[in-house]
Amino acid sequence: MPTTDGYYQDIESAISYLEGVNAFSNIKELMTGLVKDEGTIFPIMLNSELFQNHTYPQIRNLTETRKLFIELAHNETDIPKSMISYAAESFIEGPKRDSPLKNIQRLSQALGDFIIVCPTLYLADEMIARNKAVYMYSFNYRPKSSRFGEWMGVIHYEEVPFVFGYPLRKPKQYNKQDIEFSKKIMKIWTHFAKTGYQFYS
């Protein structure tokens, strides 16, 4: 969750600051983005005994999925439980009974929306409302050499190694397709940083 340190003692909360008229006064542009499966890393981070790289609990109904969301979010945040319960009802929808994989995907998406996606979009909206330029990307490439379970998809932070050329520096940890993809991503991002224009190849 957003926090303020001693340097910002005059700020009541991160949200109240973002809503202030002077927020972002020294910022002209923002580049931000999201990966396809932002939330799949959080169940493991919040309960590494229950969730692991290649295994997850066999949740078979919507009620259990919402209950687990409330437990995970409540244990790791200072957000009131009533608000978390409301989020569970709002974010997690679907049939009353479904496969464990589908329910874990619902849970992960809800956690991702709650922790990453909604705050990111909120920040972008606040900047746009102040006539700031906002550029967003969507990253949905799963590395062929991913060490994470298939159920996790494209996890949070997955784009960063490609942007900074990690597959080129550590080629033994990646395959040829990953290396070529990293080259392409670096070309696209540097072209955009220099010119402000999209680059297609």
Image (cartoon, rainbow, N blue to C red):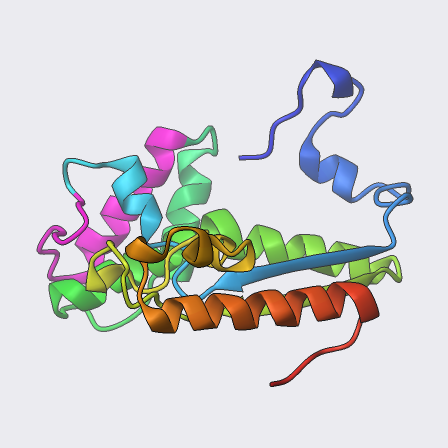
Counting from the top left corner in percent of width and height, residue 100 is at: 13, 63
- Number of numbered tags placed on the structure image: 0
The residue lying toward the viewer, choosing from 120 and 142, is: 142
* Residue 144, picture quadrant: bottom left
Whether residue 180 sits left or right of residue 89 in the image: it is right
Which residues fall within the magenta stretch? 51-76
Name the residue: 70% across, 59% down.
Answer: 31
Percent position of residue 194, x then y: 80, 65
Residue 21 vertical placement versus 117 (above, below): above
**Above or below, 11 relative to 17:** above
Residue 66 among those drawn in magenta? yes
Q: Is residue 113 visible?
A: no
**Left or right, 96 with reference to 115:** left
Q: Quick check: can you spot residue 85?
A: yes
- Residue shown at the point (36%, 57%) measured from the top left: 171
Where is residue 186 drawn, in percent x and y? 59, 65
Front in this rendered view, residue 88 or 73: 73
Q: Residue at x 48, y 34 (%)?
A: 79
Whether residue 22 is in magenta: the answer is no
Residue 170 picture location, percent across and down: 38, 51
